[in-house]
Image (spheres, rainbow, N blue to C red):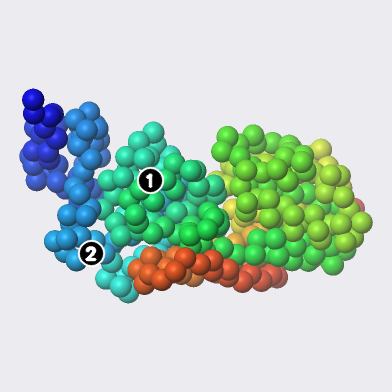
Amino acid sequence: MAGKRSAKLADVARAAGVSQGTASNVFNRPAIVRPEVRARVEASARRLGYAGPDPKGRVLRAGKVNAIGFVMADMMAYALRDPFMRLVMAGVAEECERHGAGLSLVSIRQEDAAWRLQTAVVDGFIVHCLKVSDDVIAVARERNLPFVCIDLQAGPGTSSVVIDDRRGAYLAARHLLDLGHRKIALLSLETCAVPRFGRCDAGRLRAAGFPVQRERAAGWAEALAEHGIDIETVPILEVPNERHEAVGYIQEMLQANPGTTGVLAMSDVQAMDAVDAARARGLRVPQDLSVVGFDDVPEAAAFDPPLTTIMQPILEKGRVAARLILEGGPARVEKLGVKLVVRGSTAAPRERG
């Protein structure tokens, strides 16, 4: 008895009520297909067990796909709003253009994440997730494609592009401490996949599920300890990394800790929210409250006041990650430098009248 016939693109097109050309575009040029049509075709493909065009077949026809898949744990809309993510993707895109390669964005936030990874027609993946799941790694390895992690070391045999997060956070904290600040509050990025925004204790920060947060917290703790301050005694907030979303949490913290003279944030977006929160409470920055960010996104220098922050080479992260895919070579870890950039959001503390 003959086995069940494998589904073909024509079957998917027929089931979705579209032309075969439209169905082909869903898998090869999805950007030109209306979202509702794309969703219908993808649903039909999953129902019929159609895995999409065979990447190996395409490689045989064209020599190579000449495209990179940029994998993110967040929804694409968030990635395009976030200044850090925009710069990382711009760096990847610049390198792709230099090599004449294409770029495909893949969000693994959706339930069909594995299917998206299995069917992406790419030469390799750049993964930017605070924590890469074993499933993502397994799919990439199953397809025998190289993948590079940004801001995460995923183990032997995997290339990574990282910075010295601990050093950056240490420099930020030491800057405030050297200015004379001793009453400092900390703003953390989400500590696990299911965030718990609001007050956070040092133990939760140390045990964060994401290495970036753990390393930055360790850098803060080291600098504070050098000045006799136990991080256990410092106000800590876990707050969103969306502009304006953290303001309310920070206002409550400032109300509960009226003597606070300095704020250390894990991102520039959080730092800008801290400035907004201070002003909402009638505080001046930096006269009444000094604020230090992290990243040095373009908005930091243009902010009022311009943010003191830790500069990391965000564009270069994307460029290096893309080169590791496009130019090949053995797996390796590329660690990029950081530095403190002092601007107008920090000053020595002074007595409030």
Q: Looking at the image, can residue 211 be seen?
A: yes
Identity of the residue furthest to the front in this view: 1
Rendered view: 342 above or below 181: below
Residue at the image position 47 percent from the left and 65 percent from the top: 331
Q: Which mark is residue 139?
A: 1
Q: Which residue has dot 2 on it?
A: 64
Q: Is residue 284 above or below residue 204?
A: below
Mark 2: which amino acid?
Answer: Lys
What is the spatial separation of the Cα atoms under label 2 and label 1, in whole angstroms?
20 Å
Comparing 21 with 66, the one in front is 66
Q: Report the side of 72 relative to 341 (left or right).
A: left
Residue at image coords 12%, 40%: 9
Name, please, the residue furthest toward the bottom: 98
For disc 2, the neighbor class at 10 Å (few under 14, some 14 to 19, many from 20) is some
Looking at the rendered structure, the secondary structure element under dot 1 is helix
On screen, residue 8 versus residue 209, left or right, reads left
Q: Quadrant of the N terminus?
A: top left
Number of other residues with Cα within 10 Å of mark 1, as a class: few under 14, some 14 to 19, many 20 or more:
some
Q: Residue at x 22, y 28 (%)?
A: 47
Residue 126 shown left or right of residue 150 in the figure? left
Which badge, 2 or 1, comes first in the chain's sequence? Answer: 2
Q: Looking at numbered disc 1 in the image, what kind of residue is underneath it?
A: Val
Between residue 166 and residue 296, name the one nearer to us: 166
Front residue of 324 and 18? 324
At 19% across and 47% down in the image, what residue appears? 53
